[in-house]
Amino acid sequence: MMKTVSTITINLLCQALDFPGGKVAYISEMRFISESNDKRIPCYRLLDDNGELIEDSDIDQISKEVAVKMYSEMVTLQMMDTIFYEAQRQGRISFYVTSVGEEATNIASAAALAADDVVLPQYREPGVLLWRGFTLEEFANQCFGNKADYGKGRQMPIHYGSKKLNYFTVSSPIATQLPQAVGAAYSLKMDKKDACVVTYIGDGGTSEGDFHAALNFAAVMEAPVIFICRNNGWAISTHITEQFRSDGIAVKGQAYGIQSIRVDGNDALAVYRTIRAAREIAISEQRPILVEALTYRVGHHSTSDDSTKYRPADEIEYWKMARNPVNRFRKWVERNGWWSEKEESELRSSIRKQLLQAIQVAEKTEKPALGNLFSDVYDLPPSNLREQEKQLRETINRHPQDYPSDVPM
Amino acid sequence: MASCLRRYGRRLSVSICEKRELSTACEGKVIQQQQQQQQQQTAKLLNLCSAINQALHLALETDPRSYVFGEDVSFGGVFRCTTGLTERFGKNRVFNTPLCEQGIVGFGIGLAAMGNRAIAEIQFADYIYPAFDQIVNEAAKFRYRSGNQYDCGGLTIRAPYGAVGHGGHYHSQSPEAFFCHVPGIKVVIPRSPQQAKGLLLSCIRDPNPVVFFEPKWLYRLAVEEVPEHDYMLPLSEAEVIREGSDITLVGWGAQLSIMEQACTDAEKDGISCELIDLKTLIPWDKETVETSVRKTGRLLISHEAPVTGGFGAEISASIVERCFLRLEAPVARVCGLDTPFPLVFEPFYMPTKNKILDAIKSTVNY
């Protein structure tokens, strides 16, 4: 008996290599791992295209209050985008980026988080700020770069940031926020906070080296960070078929030792539940999670882009109408008896008024004073900046016509 | 040189820059130590890497929210600068990172933005470039672009730089000029162990992101008395380390000892040289250099980095702007050649003592 057991043991030992990380079985047949799995990673969804709950599972339903707030904010985001985009077309603001088509990804993910969770956005997630309480006036102030802008008029429109709402300031470079998110998450881990970091990236951004750096670091550091990839099909004019050859983004998680999931980014309920679950795992297990939200960028990349130049108009129309996340969620909310046409028109007219008012006021508010050009480069201005400010002011006195009159001295 | 340094070092070690903000965790302790300084001014002979090691120990000891990380730092580092830190402070605070400079700096920015002191090591300055985007586009602009809502002032990036005798293209570079062109960060380079300890502690505690280049040539070679207590040396203050009246020489890091030898030789020929250690390259102390050049009327700058576009050009242009009518001769630059750093040809590439001496003489005899 003993002899048989030990023989089997020896046979098993000879068929495996003891390598850091665990035993690796040997194989005598040469086999290349396929570049793709037979089946694509499935996409988690709860609501069908008509906003009907697909399975009445034992999922804990979200409350009426949360659902109505989510829906209202999705509408607000949609309207803010429409009106601010128009303002740019009219030449009132210099630039704008819409999130049309991605309202569910924005709002539902934000709704699933707590106020203490630290958010590091890319730039197409203003819905997260909106959910947390950034006002339409605050959005307008940043877009106009006036003296009420928390960024003090230094950056282009849509580069929002809010310390009080735990939303790191947007920067244009793609994916740079990802390794920073890992460092921030490590801080939460060390301080034993009941919170996580959530950072957003588009499909294009996952090609950047910072994406690879961040996921690898997050896994090794066991950092409580959720990476949410908004796979919206386009990186300016570059379609995802030109961006990567993998099965989207979710498949990459395992390569780093990170749990991942693919979710229907236009299903607000599914996004909400997914981020709730991801957050629970990230915090209780102190590990990163990768979430790929499949969605579509209905709008152009920005006001500097005309996407009809590189994609068919009927594709845009299809996603705008048939796959609209706001309509879809509306149907579900209405079916629950929590929303009606009356409330819809009241909300829309109220938001429209607020938006127009916000833009009017922001437009008339003066710009930040000239001193803000020189402050905050360092904590205190060094001698070269003090000298340059002095020289600049002398130049302005000699040639006032060269300078905009709406910047106070 | 050693006794001269001791004299200046002693005077400076008592000063604390009032302008600088310490993390509240360490402020009380440093001031307490300052008071103790009168009683115990003990010093020990240390080399550069030990001095840096001491600074890191003190930084971690005085601020519980400070971290040291980078490739191979856990076992002590490839230059032994991080010896004993993991054992003393634990692997949560002193840890290896994956081999990825953009990740190291990005991670450090995030950690610093949450109010921690993030002390990142880049193994060789030659490998800092993958992190250039994070340093220039992110760290340097973090405070400004957020309207001062956020900052990553707690970030310090340390990297060994400079010629080592056999380093070739990728273990000898002096990339400081790239970083001196970036508003929002500070660039600091120490010349000696006693300087390195005080400057590094200032960098770590300065509320701005700092790149700290350590002259690897001096890690073991430079030995001097280093005070054992916690002391800080001011940033953006240049130091006249040798007084003179005929010509001003400006340099930093390891090059200063070469320049010092040239000054000594020049003295034998009756030329009195004033030697200035710039220490902080940005923001740099123009006033000290200008005062010196107004006295001597001549300026010579020397650095290992290639001459074209090197930081010497900035110093030269600024001083010519300020002192044109006082200058008796063109500003001289004795620097590395405009080539990748060569191996066999290193002795030809380097700005040697005799190259400097020749330039001193031709400037004085202009």
Image (cartoon, rainbow, N blue to C red):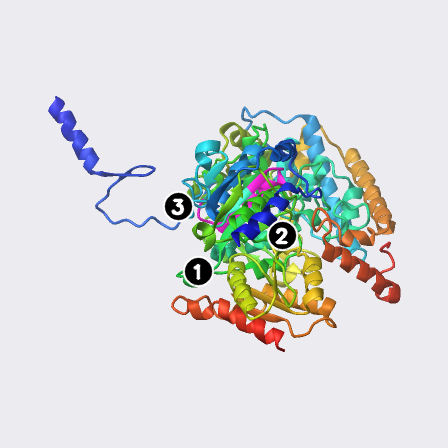
Which secondary structure lies at badge 2? Answer: strand
Which secondary structure lies at badge 3? Answer: loop
Q: Which residues are magenta?
A: B98-118
Q: In terms of depth relative to the viewer, which is nearer, A308 or A402?
A: A402
Q: Which residue position is annotated with label 3?
A: A37
The chain letter for the residue carrying disc 1 is: B
- Amino acid at dot 2: Lys
Quick check: marks 2 and 1 in contact, CB under 8 Å?
A: no
Q: In terms of depth relative to the viewer, which is nearer, A165 or B159?
A: B159
Q: Which residue position is annotated with label 2?
A: B186
Q: Residues within 10 Å of mark 3 (few under 14, many from 20)?
A: few
Q: Residues within 10 Å of mark 2 (few under 14, many from 20)?
A: many
x and y, in percent, of residue A373 in the image: 77, 54
Quick check: marks 1 and 3 in contact, CB under 8 Å?
A: no
Q: Which residue position is annotated with label 1?
A: B170
Q: Does the magenta run of residues contain A240? A: no
Q: Main secondary structure of the magenta part?
A: helix
Gap between marks 1 and 3 measured at Cα: 41 Å
- Amino acid at dot 3: Asn
Which secondary structure lies at badge 1? Answer: helix
